[in-house]
Image (cartoon, grey):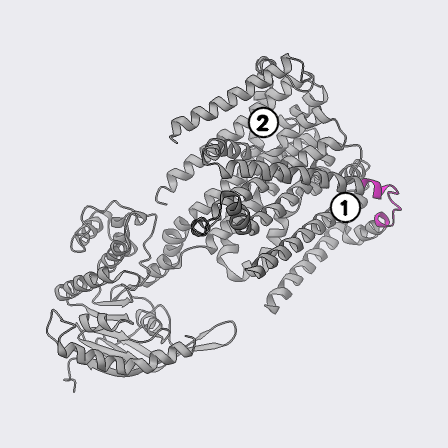
Amino acid sequence: MRRIVLARLGLLAGLLALWELWASRRDPLLYVPPSRVLPALGRVLRLEAYPTLLEHFGLTVLEVLAAYLLAVGLGLALGFALGLSRPVGEIYEPLLAGLYAIPSVVWYPSLMLFFGLGPASKVAFGMLLGFFPVVLAVLAGIRSVDQQLLVVARGLGAGAGTCFVKVMLPSMTATLLAGLRAGLALTVVGVLVGEILGARRGLGYLINYAYGFLRTAEYAALALLALGLVLAVDGVAAWVEGRARRWTEGAA
Amino acid sequence: MRPVTAAAHIEVRAVAKEWLTRDHPVPALAAISLDVAPHEFLTVLGPSGCGKSTLLSIIGGLTSPDTGEVRIGGHPVARPDPRQVAMVFQDPGLFPWRTALENVEFGLELQGVAAGPRRERARALLEPVGLRGFEGRYPRELSGGMKQRVAIARALALDAPILLMDEPFGALDEQTRLLMGEWLLGIWARTRKTVVFVTHSLQEAILLSQRIVVMTARPGRIKASFEVTLPTPRDLDAPPAATLRHALWDAIRDESRRALDGGA
Amino acid sequence: MTPARRQLAQAASLAALVAVWELAVRAGWADPLFVPAPSAVARALGVVAPEALGLLGETLGKTLAAYALAVSLGVGAGLLVGGIRYLHDVLSPFLVALYALPKILVLPWILLTFGLGMTPAVVYGVLQGFFPICLLVAGGVRDIDQGPLRVARSMGATSWQLYRKVVLPAVLPAVLAGMRLGIVFCLLGVLVVEMFGGIRGMGFLLVSLANAFRAPELFAATALVSLLSIAVVLGLERLNRRLGHWR
């Protein structure tokens, strides 16, 4: 195991070194080696490069939050509607699968037309991307419930509501949480894509701005910041997932 | 006292094998030696984890021993030789994307036999295993017993003089297992192959073999050898069989307990 | 429920949706500037189709180029990473991380480096399509049933025979699953590049129509791309079922 971790670190270090060597002897406008990205990152984080950074970053975070809440709400509602009723599910699931075959970005221009360039279109797009994993997870979760458990519960006199709350939901928790976590990741991507494709404010907008002005080092720094946001958000989601899993499994 | 016969078909000489797991090495076989005569039906009986599968793997050339060697017909075994040895495992291992017929053809395909002749041979082999009419079925359409019969037909297609079988009926229910055992004996009587049959079922051992070899718990060694001279078809309730059963159980009970406690 | 009844219900639901939508616009509940009536969209389809189909062809061309590359690289890498234990242990966290990473972050740089035209679209398409394919194939290789493999080895199969006759057929379902996912990702990548970089193609058309507030034409064009994508995926799905009839 130790050897493998060392190999990974070695690979990472090697790639960084390669990047540094290769980029530093080329057009500085296009290629920024790590040695220039890091100071740029410093400038960005100290708010020297973009004094309004916090505003933009904050807006992006708010958009993600709003989009995610909507995605989860819609996803859970649709997921349970399709999953709990066999006929409804049989009719509409293939249609949902059809939607899944369409690259999500084709909806964005329509959203831009409807909502404009402001945060609303980003929230809508983020919601659109994020709700799929949630719906799929609900459907998968319902399917994964051990029918035996339901039989036992009904045999013990549990009604439909009790069965749902005390048998189905706990059985589904792991799958649901994984779906919620995937949905969050996609929501973040959706918001960022929306901002980069066309916005007036937000982290994605800043990235676009830096790129437009060929401030490549700062663009790279902002991209790293966005990456950091993605990782942090997923880290929180992973922690919640782990906590909840221990709680449900511990209780069992 | 065993009569001295012609040169043994399979000779296992002081074979030892250790498996390296993540934490520590696990000894599977400890300097085990064994002779199998030509045309003999030998059963290797032992508790779980005693290394019987490892032994079979080594004889079949799938693994090499750490020390010692195995010879077949006098020649050392270095790799699987389908002209000498055919193997059947507990998991039938049928190729799901091939029909029953195509599965049976597999070994012949590997050897470069032309399509026409090999198809004919495969078809002919499905007949004695009772699967005529099932040539075009896919494994997912076959029951456990049928799958294992296809696997055995596939092994028989190699026409190798030795057949190694690692608990082939272990995954089947009791009735099927008994029927398959009878059927296997019929095949053996007809083809006169040398069979090494691994099982942990005393019943199966008594029903099928000419000789039973009992292994110790891990690391495996030969503990005892029993000639089975009962007339066929074998009646398990008759006194001679019952005596043999007691003897076997005596030999194996402690080993089984040791295997159970040792967390095999 | 029989397939016929199901399809009837689906068609009826869609028809009802379209009817309600048409009514909503006619009754004035929805502003036709933002939400065009289905009848307007249908008319616009005729108007925009010639240009849209041509551009769709261009986008499709870039997508197929990206797809060919993504599949060859992805399947190859997937077979290696799945098959060689060491590679899998070392590389899989990187691959999973890169898959999860929003690739749009490197898009501006790709445009800077490769300029405008076909190249950035194909490069980005490959970037999008490679990871899902690679991960699915690697997973498929890791999940190969050991039973048949052992039997083949016991029959003296050479490495090449093992590969061709056991590994590849066993891995095929995973490869097809990866390919089905990959085409959507490649198309997505190409569209994003066209939208972001103003490069000629369906993506650019959609953005232009949106900027010009030509809602009916935009909806019509969106419908065209969507139908194409669904058709391609359904086609691959049928291929998958055909090749995997033994499952």
Residue at 60 percent across and 65 percent down: it is A4
Instruction: Spot the residue most to the front.
Output: A157
Residue at 27 percent across and 75 percent down: it is B44
Query: Seen in the image, is C214 located left or right of residue A29?
Result: left
Task: State the SS at label 1.
Answer: helix
**How far from the left and from the top, in percent, is residue B138?**
30, 47
**How far from the left and from the top, in percent, is residue C15?**
51, 20
Q: Is residue A48 magenta?
A: yes
**How far from the left and from the top, in percent, is residue C80?**
51, 54
What residue did someone put label 2 on?
Answer: C58
**How far from the left and from the top, in percent, is residue B195?**
22, 70
Label 2 environment density (alpha carbons within 10 Å; few <14, some 14–19, many ≥20)? some
The residue type indicated by label 2 comes to Glu
Q: How many marks?
A: 2
Label 1 environment density (alpha carbons within 10 Å; few <14, some 14–19, many ≥20)? many
| Stretch in magenta | A43-56
**Relative depth, front residue between A110 and B245:** B245
Q: To which chain does the residue with label 2 belong?
A: C
From this viewpoint, is residue B14 visible? no
Instruction: Spot the residue most to the left.
Output: B231
Could you say which disc has been placed on residue A220 in the image?
Answer: 1
From this viewpoint, is residue A85 visible? yes
The residue type indicated by label 1 comes to Ala
CB of mark 2 within 8 Å of CB of mark 1?
Answer: no
Which image quarter holds the N terminus of chain C?
Answer: top left
Task: State the SS at label 2.
Answer: helix
Against A185, is C239 above or below?
Answer: above
